[in-house]
Image (cartoon, rainbow, N blue to C red):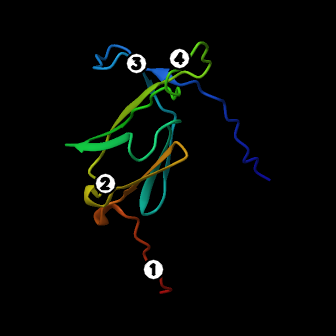
Amino acid sequence: MVDTTVDIEKKEAQTTEGVEHTRAVKVYHPAVDIVEKAKEIVLTADMPGVDDKSIDVTLEKNVLTIYGKVDLDVPEKYRASYVEYGVGDYRRSFTLSEEIDRQRIEATVKNGVLKLVLPKAEAVKTKKIEVRAA
């Protein structure tokens, strides 16, 4: 019997170093899971606090960039006196290979989780070859 359990370790959000930003706010690298399937690659990014109006997904040449803007939600006429939750924006970039069909990329966000579906181009999809008895 094969043991298929995998230990998963919690990873803290990392900030981007050496990059200039136009807003005075921390910018984090969101934690990302990438799963390859037969017909597509699915990328899931944890970006708490973002919604469909505060997130941008861009593709320029071969670079796919995700950016989410998060602001501290403080009611009007109040100020935050103590905050434990690290507030900041999210940015992460990925270089895509020619295997991805750029015209059919889909992005959805729900409860601060961004899901990108990157369909594989027809030329690189796995093809099942029938084997016949001779």
Residue at 45 percent of width and 28 percent of height: 71
Residues under numbered marks 4 and 3 in contact, where contact means CB atoms less than 8 Å apart: no
Query: Which residue is pictured at 53% across the width and 20% down the height?
Result: 78
Residue behind mark 4: 79
Q: Earlier in the sequence, mark 2 or mark 4?
A: 4
Question: Which amino acid type corresponds to the residue marked 2 in the rendered image?
Answer: Glu
Q: Are marks 2 and 4 in contact (CB under 8 Å)?
A: no
Q: Position of residue 30 (x, y in %)?
A: 48, 32
Q: Are marks 2 and 1 in contact (CB under 8 Å)?
A: no
- In the image, 79: left or right of 10? left
Is residue 10 rendered to the left or right of residue 67? right
Vertical order, 104 against 91 (above or below): below
Going by the numbered disc 1, the residue's amino acid type is Glu
Tag of residue 99: 2
Q: Position of residue 52 (x, y in %)?
A: 41, 47
The residue labelled by disc 3 is 25
